Amino acid sequence: MRRAEAQRSYSPVGSSLPPISSVWPCIKNRGLVSCYDAKTGKPFYQDERLDAPGDYYASIVAAGDKVFFASLNGVVTVLQAGDDLKVPGTSSFWRIHQRHAGHR
């Protein structure tokens, strides 16, 4: 699967994260995470369910080799960037509210 094809199946609102080293992690609503080879587009893992279901519209954040996904339910999940799914931690926050046209 090419990156453009993979990206079309993910959240239409959240921003895309540039590849980290040789991997490209991304998330769908309902807490389904996938990671692709940044050069070939082949999946390392695909549609693995995080223990944080919900909608994902927040920008994906990366720091070092960690990737942070925040759900509207207020759960931030930390992934270790790599070719296998590693979740070193999660943290619960209050419900994350988006304030833009049409949402209150």
Image (spheres, rainbow, N blue to C red):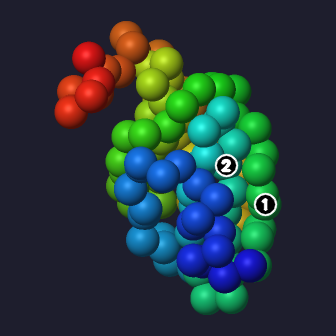
- Give how far across and how far down residue 66 sits, in percent: 47, 52
**Image-based side of 73 in relation to 99, left or right:** right
* Residue 62 % position (x, y): 39, 55
| Residue pictured at 77% horizontal, 50% vertical | 47
List x then y, in percent, for residue 9: 64, 59
Element marked by disc 1: strand
Which residue is the extreme one toward the front? 102
Distance from the alpha carbon under mark 2 to that under mark 1: 8 Å
**Residue 30 vertical position relative to residue 1 in the rendered view, above or below:** above
Amino acid type at image mark 2: Val
User: Seen from this angle, which residue lies furthest top?
Assistant: 94
Q: Is residue 19 positioned above or below 50 on the image?
A: below
Contact between marks 2 and 1 (CB within 8 A): the answer is yes
Image disc number at residue 68: none
Q: Is residue 17 left or right of residue 54?
A: left
Q: Position of residue 80 (x, y in %)?
A: 58, 52
Q: Where on the picture, by quarter, is residue 51?
A: top right
Query: Which labelled disc corresponds to residue 33?
Result: 2
What residue sits right under mark 1 in the picture?
Answer: 45
Give the residue displayed 43% in from the left and 62% down from the top.
16
